[in-house]
Image: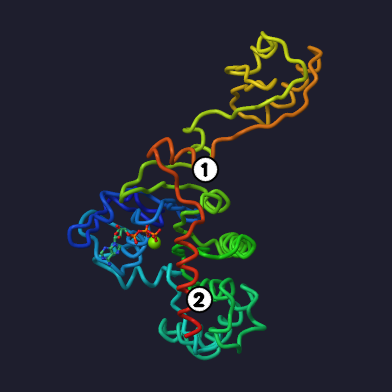
Amino acid sequence: MGADLDGFAIVVEGLVKRYGRIVAVNGVSFRVGYGEVFGFLGPNGAGKTTTIHVLATLLRPDGGRVMVAGRDVVRDPVGVRRSIGVVFQDPSLDGELTGYENLYLHGRIYGLRGGLLEERIEEMLRFVELWEHRDRLVKYYSGGMRRRLEIARALLHRPRILFLDEPTLGLDPQTRAHIWDYIRKMHREMGVTVFLTTHYMEEAEALCDRIAIIDHGKIIAEGTPEELKRMAGNDIVYLKIRDVKPGVCGFFEDLALECRELPGGRIALKVGDAVKSLPGILLRARDKGLEVLEASYHRPSLNDVFLLLTGREIREEGPMDMIKAVVMSRRWRR
Ligand SMILES: Nc1ncnc2c1ncn2[C@@H]1O[C@H](COP(=O)(O)OP(=O)(O)OP(=O)(O)O)[C@@H](O)[C@H]1O
Ligand SMILES: [Mg+2]
């Protein structure tokens, strides 16, 4: 690969990974620039974890090329490992150790020791607001605390690139939002490049500069959240109007791409950007003597994009999450 690839944190070209006959990743290509938050969004079994494991040098690719931090994952896995931190989908902390001890062990594995190690541990535990809980056994931590500890651990050796595999899987919405704050803060304050996987659309939208949607081992769409949503079409503004007369759409011809009269005194206006168009539409309604009883709009979601491309929904929080969450918590309480 040539010099044009300098400056990319991650370069993946035609990655293939098989488990026996199963093709888990089937010719995936993408690039992530330094400082970006890049998301892999896809349903169960799409190939997200497999991809992260290849990028993190835990699995050997069967085809294609993968460069992380300027190094080839096959030829220089040790070099890659020095530049990355990983938070795995399945918890990998030792529940019988304290939070502090978990970080200490990890730091030693990375060759940190003495005063430097102690400094880093304190810095990271304070960063994720676990310093006060440092001497508690991890098996008594909540799910959100464990996730934060894992993030702190992954950052201990100051990696340039952080991989997060389903960082908020099975957590309640409030805890999830809390973890998002740490990811944003870490990205902002430490300039870490983030590659994360998720099947939560809101998570991808809330955190990522760019998203690749992955399904059955292939990337089916890639772009900023806004670009992706634009693929699914326009925004729709709905108005409910008192005593609406046929032909009402004529009043809005120049303001909307399309207008349709719906049953129940409602009209639907197709527009480029609902938030920008709405004031003009309401003013026009008033000028034409229409009494607007309700106004609302629908903006395509990433789910609409997925639906459009695959005919299926990206699974929202469902029974599998619950099962995974229960399995995870059992593992700890054994
Ligand atoms: N060790 C393995 N042996 C055999 N097949 C595997 C193995 N790991 C994963 N697979 C299969 O490879 C495919 C991709 O799995 P992967 O775990 O990468 O998906 P994922 O997108 O991370 O899914 P999830 O959202 O459930 O975590 C699936 O069909 C899965 O069943
Ligand atoms: Mg996975």
Looking at numbered disc 2 in the image, what kind of residue is underneath it? Ser
Q: Does mark 1's beta carbon lie closer than 8 Å to ligand 1?
A: no
Which quadrant holds residue 256? Answer: top right
Q: Nearer the viewer, residue 305 or 222?
A: 305
Name, please, the residue furthest toward the left: 21
Asked if marks 2 and 1 touch (Cβ < 8 Å), the reply is no
Above or below, 183 relative to 240: below
Above or below, 70 relative to 206: below
Residue depicted at x 78% and y 12%:
288
The residue under label 2 is 329
Relative side of 212 to 192, left or right: left
Looking at numbered disc 1 in the image, what kind of residue is underneath it? Pro
Where residue 284 appears, as percent x and y from the top left, is 76, 16
Q: Can residue 154 be seen by looking at this rendering?
A: yes
| N-term-proximal mark, 2 vs 1 | 1
Q: Badge 1: few (under 14), some or many (20 or more) residues near its Cα, within 10 Å?
A: many
Where residue 279 appears, as percent x and y from the top left, is 74, 26
Q: Which mark is residue 225?
A: 1
Residue depicted at x 22% and y 62%:
19
The quadrant of the picture showing ligand 2 is bottom left
Which quadrant holds residue 182? Answer: bottom right
Residue depicted at x 78% and y 26%:
293
- Label 2 and label 1: CA atoms lie apart by 33 Å
Q: Nearer the viewer, residue 78 or 168?
A: 168
Where residue 260 appears, as percent x and y from the top left, is 60, 17
Q: Nearer the viewer, residue 163 or 200?
A: 200
